[in-house]
Amino acid sequence: MAPTKYITRTIPRISLADFPTRLDAITAQLLHAAETDGFFSLTDTEISIPEITAIFSTSQSFFALPDALKATVPFTHANVGWESRSQIRPSTGVADQKESYQLQFGANMSGKWLPDAALPGFKPSAQLFMQKAQSLSEKLLLCFARGLGFPDDFFVQAHDSSRPDCQSVLRLLHYFAVDPAAGPLPETYYRAGVHADWDLLTLLFQLPGQSGLEICPGREVVTNFGMGDEWTKVDFATGDISTFHRVKAPQEEGD
């Protein structure tokens, strides 16, 4: 496989400050970014840097548990639960080098929360962040509905978190460490192979120094799974939140 071709792309950085009074301006910026750039980052959101840092700590506390304990809440096709190296992308034909724990609001989570004795405080901490992310998502859904000429609540109603079958998901991810002594990674090594998420909206959170996210806007993908197209490495400012994308392991990192 030929080496990846990288280019620099402009990624719009959209502020949500003063959302109620700037609604129309924010809507115009979001629609323009979605139509022309295919990707954007958000700043001045209702989710603070300490809250983002805290959910990563909460996530780490789960993944630090023994696999045998995590396996008591296994992934199901209701799109909840824990999996490890089981997601095989058509773009690579091999399993992603990661584990994930998918959480929802409704009835699908029955039996999929670890007991508090196993992980004290995990459930309320995760649910609090889920509510914050849902609130932010609903602001964006309102903008997209308005920009597309639908009633403001068109998408919000379809993603009502009070519905027992709501498929809004918080997906906690842990990408496995690579051994720096093993030498350069092959071009075919992906922590998450090329894919476009199947949902309406994905909010990506990352911590400073934890790079690896790469994008190739959908309208620019002309080769099979974008393998011969030009990709851009994404590294957002602290606290920012960022459709074909993938996650590679930076060559210089050790974990």
Image (tube, rainbow, N blue to C red):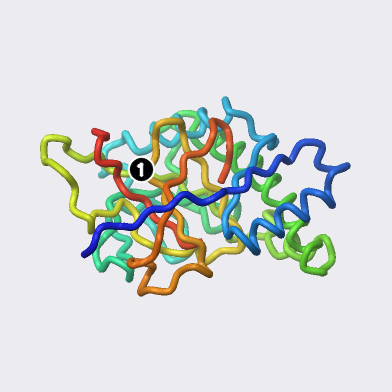
Residue, x 51% and y 51% (percent of image)?
Answer: 9
Within-10-Å neighbours for mark 1: few <14, some 14–19, many 20+:
some
User: Total label count?
Assistant: 1
Q: Residue furthest right?
A: 21
Query: Dividing the picture into quarters, in which one does residue 2 lie?
Result: bottom left
Residue, x 77% and y 49% (percent of image)?
Answer: 26
Q: Is residue 44 above or below residue 150?
A: above
Percent from the top left, x then y, of residue 150? 81, 69
Percent from the top left, x then y, of residue 127? 58, 40
**What quarter of the picture does the N terminus occupy?**
bottom left
Query: Dividing the picture into quarters, in which one does residue 195 lie?
Result: bottom left
Q: Is residue 250 above or below residue 94?
A: above
Q: Amino acid at mark 1?
A: His
Q: Is residue 254 above or below residue 189?
A: above
Q: Residue furthest left?
A: 182
Q: Residue furthest top?
A: 50
Which residue occupies the foreground of this view, 72 or 248? 248
Percent from the top left, x then y, of residue 124? 57, 35
**What quarter of the picture does the C terminus occupy?**
top left
The residue that disc 1 covers is 174
- Is 142 on the left-hand or right-hand side of 214? right
- Is 94 on the left-hand or right-hand side of 231? left
Residue, x 35% and y 74% (percent of image)?
Answer: 224
Which residue occupies the foreground of this view, 70 or 212? 212
Which residue occupies the foreground of this view, 120 or 221? 221
State the SS at label 1: strand
